[in-house]
């Protein structure tokens, strides 16, 4: 539930339009740009004044255990980087395995009551509790990951993960021999859909005959379910497995079946081996250190950040052909330079409808509310994939991924 779950398209549009009026560094519709921070329509927010020798107290709220190289692990690497960067000027602590909902509000409030100056809440389901607690503590900074609600003392941060998803699709599409690629998906929400689509576009850019078969687990961190889903895809003939969860179980299942895989969140090859061809990865430390520095300087302002500088690809496995590495590097450079785009037309849906016309590129608002699948995606999104996603999950109709 931690991901970018913007199901109310109107809210997204209003947010982006207001942000644009505030002087966006990255105009909507240019997702290839490395920038992406837009000031939220708010006052200056709190100014943190520290006594001589007093440390800036920074807290992190994690939805899962730090574990083996997943989402929470990547955030904790950023926490460690903050502590190393700022040394005695900062105290950075965390609580892991915090359920979304009322329990998260209690944990967030506890940090605020203990005098923490800056609190990072790293799951989508923490959004409303974060805003709720922020109203009670207007002199504390809150940074929520993957949501869309801001306030004078609340920012949102997320990355353009569609870029490395697309690039990793190029790698997968070039590696498959069966032309069946498995994708273990979490929840049926725009962020996950966007990732599936970007990955599939990358696959079919080098292998138009390949298909991406999707199985949903309705989990972010459910090792048994994620392994089971990967095994089901392997049994269908998939020889490359990709995923959108926080464990390495799909990669392990692939390796045990002598298949290949694409990781996620961090470089999973270190945990599984070189059957992991590459991984779309997060580098939260880049943005987090910038925020901490600005809070220390008294210059930080509420913002909505959606940028490319915090995402990338892990090093390539020796099993990836040098020619494919060159293609990926060229595409990455072009996208980040703004001369290419993942979601420019013509793009057909997997039901045969032209969704993105030639010469048109999707705007940020369209990306952040994506609810359709590109040609080449096969599978079914069960109703359970929306369960537990909050009250707005019911606003998204159940649908079939491929007719």
Image (spheres, rainbow, N blue to C red):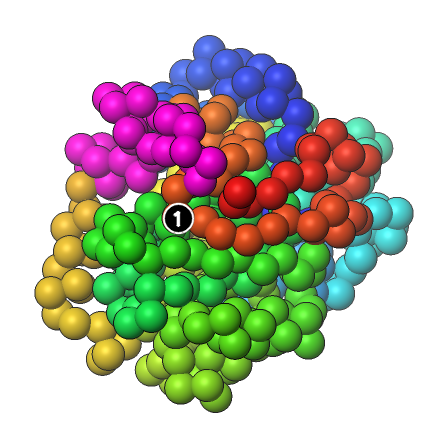
* Left or right for 274, reference 87: left
Residue 325 position in % (x across, y down): 17, 64
Quarter occupied by residue 326: bottom left
- Residue at x 18% of width, y 41% of height: 334
Q: Is residue 282 visible?
A: yes
Q: Secondary structure at mark 1?
A: loop
Viewer-nearest residue: 192 or 139: 192
Location of residue 280 in the rendering, given as x and y in whole percent from the top left corner: 40, 59
**Crowding near the residue tagged with mark 1, few <14, some 14–19, many ≥20 C-alpha atoms within 10 Å:** many
What predominant SS class does the magenta segment belong to? Answer: loop
**Residue sitting at the far front:** 403
Who's the residue at 62% across and 57% down the image?
216
Q: Which residue is mark 1?
A: 376
Along the line of sight, the residue nearer the viewer: 205 or 326: 205
Residue 357 is one of the magenta-drawn residues: yes
Query: Which residue lies at the image location 43% right of the left edge and 56% below the top edge?
Result: 212
How many numbered marks appear? 1
Question: Is 131 on the left-hand or right-hand side of 364?
Answer: right
Find the residue positioned furthest to the top: 21
Judge whether 193 appears above or below 264 on screen: above
- Return the x and y of residue 301 as percentages of the image width and height: 54, 29
Image location (x, y in percent) of residue 187: 64, 50
**Region of the chain picked out in magenta, as a range:** 335-362
Q: Residue at x 17, y 63 (%)?
A: 324
Q: Measured along the vertical axis of the image, is residue 199 above or below residue 154?
A: below
């Amino acid at each position: 539930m931690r991901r970018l779950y913007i199901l109310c398209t109107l809210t997204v549009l209003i947010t982006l339009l207001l942000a644009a009026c505030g002087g966006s560094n990255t105009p909507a519709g240019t997702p290839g740009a490395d920038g992406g921070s837009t000031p939220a329509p708010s006052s200056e927010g709190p100014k943190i004044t520290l006594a001589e020798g007093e440390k800036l107290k920074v807290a992190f709220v994690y939805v899962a255990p730090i574990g083996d190289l997943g989402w929470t692990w990547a955030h904790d690497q950023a926490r460690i980087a903050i502590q190393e960067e700022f040394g005695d000027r900062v105290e950075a602590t965390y609580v892991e395995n915090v359920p979304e909902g009322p329990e998260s509000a209690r944990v967030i409030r506890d940090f605020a009551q203990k005098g923490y100056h800056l609190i990072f809440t790293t799951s989508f389901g923490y959004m409303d509790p974060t805003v709720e607690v922020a109203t009670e503590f207007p002199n504390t900074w809150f940074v929520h990951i993957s949501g869309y609600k801001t306030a004078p003392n609340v920012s949102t941060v997320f990355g353009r993960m569609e870029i490395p998803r697309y690039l990793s699709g190029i790698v997968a599409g070039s590696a498959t021999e069966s032309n069946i690629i498995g994708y273990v998906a979490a929840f049926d929400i725009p962020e996950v859909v966007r990732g599936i689509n970007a990955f599939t576009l990358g696959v079919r850019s080098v292998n138009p005959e390949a298909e991406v078969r999707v199985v949903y687990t309705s989990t972010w961190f459910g090792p048994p379910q994620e392994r089971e889903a990967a095994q089901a895809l392997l049994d269908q003939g998939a020889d490359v497995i990709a995923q959108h969860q926080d464990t390495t179980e799909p990669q392990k299942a692939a390796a045990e079946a002598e298949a290949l895989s694409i990781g996620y969140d961090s470089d999973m090859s270190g945990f599984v081996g070189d059957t992991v061809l590459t991984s779309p990865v997060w580098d939260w430390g880049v943005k987090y250190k910038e925020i901490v520095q600005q809070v220390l300087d008294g210059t930080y302002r509420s913002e909505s950040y959606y940028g490319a500088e915090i995402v990338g690809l892990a090093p390539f496995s020796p099993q990836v052909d040098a020619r494919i590495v060159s293609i990926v590097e060229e595409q990455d450079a072009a996208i980040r330079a703004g001369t290419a785009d993942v979601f420019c037309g013509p793009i057909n849906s997997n039901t045969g409808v032209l969704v993105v016309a030639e010469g048109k590129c999707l705007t940020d608002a369209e990306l952040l509310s994506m609810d359709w699948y590109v040609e080449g995606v096969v599978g079914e999104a069960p109703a359970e994939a929306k369960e537990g996603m909050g009250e707005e999950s019911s606003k998204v109709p159940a649908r079939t991924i491929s007719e």
